[in-house]
Image (cartoon, grey):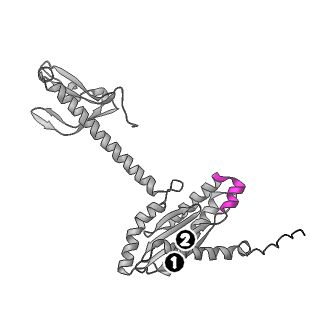
Amino acid sequence: MDSYTVRGYSRRIVMPLSYYDRAFHGTESFTADEILPRLRTESDHTRNLFFVPLHFRERCLGYFAVVNSDFPMESTMFHSWSINISNSLENFRKLLCLDEIVQELDRLYAIDSLTGIFNRNGFKRSAGKVFDECIENGRTVMIMFADMDGLKAINDSFGHKAGDHAIRSIASVLQESCLHGEIACRFGGDEFFIFAADYTEQEAEKLRSRIQEGLEICNRNAGRPYQLGISIGACITVPQPGTTIFQLITIADHRMYEEKKKKNPSKYLKQPAQPAPAQEA
C-alpha cells in the first residue's frame, strides 16, 4: 500500500515486454520522464503513437505505447484486452499483498512483540519437531530456564518503560549468546528459556558463561542506574517416550528457583506464623 500510485507514475518505469525491429525484447527500465526511450531515436518516417493507460479504478498500473499501428483504433477487442490485463495485474498485486499479510500474521503468532525473540507458539513450532526426533533417536536435549532478577524493583523505582527496556536487554543477551543453533524464547513476563539438542554439561556451562559475560558487558556499557541479572537452571537429559518438553521446563524452573534462593536466601525464608487474635470473652 505504501507504493500505491494514484496520479502519475513512479520515478522509474519497467517495461516487461516490447516488440520492435521485428523482434521481441526482454525487460527494460527507464525514467518516467522519458515516456518511451525509443521516441528519442532519429527516424526518417512519420510515427503515429497511441498511449493507452493501464489502471484499476484509481490505481495507476502503467500504459501501452503502440507505434505505427491502427490496432488500438480498429480492433474491437483492444478495449476489453486492456481491461483484462489491468484486472490481471490488480489480482496479482492482491495475491502479493495477501501473501505479505499472511507472513506478517505468522510472524506475530510466533514472535514476542516486546523482545523480538520466539514466544511460546514460536518455541513449540521450532523446537517441537527437534524434541520429537531426540526422543525417537535417543539424543540429549537441554532446557535452560532463566528468570530476570529484580524486575519489580526496576519497575517500582524507574517505571515500567525501564522494566520493558530491561526485559528487551535480557532477551538480546540470551539471543546473542546462542551461537550453535540454540532456540531462545520468552516464556512470559521476565521468564525465558533456551532449548538445544545434543548438548552436554560442558556446553551448557559454556552457554551460561556467555550469558553472564554478555550481561556484564551490557551493565558496563549501558550506563543504567540499575544492574541486570538473571538466575539460571538447566535440565540435560535423554527424553523418554511420553515426556513433554514442558515437563523438562518445569525441572529447569525448579533448579533456577534454587539458584535464586542462594542469591537472596532471606527473601525465601518461611515467615513465622502469626498468632491468632484473642477472642473476646
Q: Is residue 115 shown above or below 133?
A: above
**Front one among 64 and 276:** 276
Residue projecting furthest to the left:
22
Give, as a single range, the part of the protein colored magenta. 150-160
Quarter occupied by the C terminus: bottom right
Q: Residue at x 59, y 70 (%)?
A: 212
Residue 189 inside the magenta-drawn segment: no
Horizontal arrangement in the rendering, residue 215 relative to residue 122 (left or right): right
Q: Position of residue 249 (x, y in %)?
A: 51, 72
Magenta segment, principal secondary structure? helix
Graded by Cα atoms within 10 Å as few (under 14), some (14 to 19) or many (20 or more), the crowding at tag 2 reads many
Q: Is residue 208 shown above or below 217?
A: below
> Do the numbered discs 1 and 2 sit on residues whose CB atoms are within 8 Å?
yes
Mark 2 — residue? Answer: 145
User: Reading the chain from its start, which is encountered first: label 1 or label 2?
Assistant: 2
Quarter occupied by the N terminus: top left
Mark 1 — residue? Answer: 235
Instruction: Write down the quadrant of residue 265 in the picture.
Output: bottom right
Q: Is residue 199 shown above or below 29?
A: below
Q: Amino acid at mark 2?
A: Phe
Q: Position of residue 161 (x, y in %)?
A: 63, 51
Instruction: Write down the quadrant of residue 56 in the picture.
Output: top left
Horizontal arrangement in the rendering, residue 189 relative to residue 281 (left or right): left
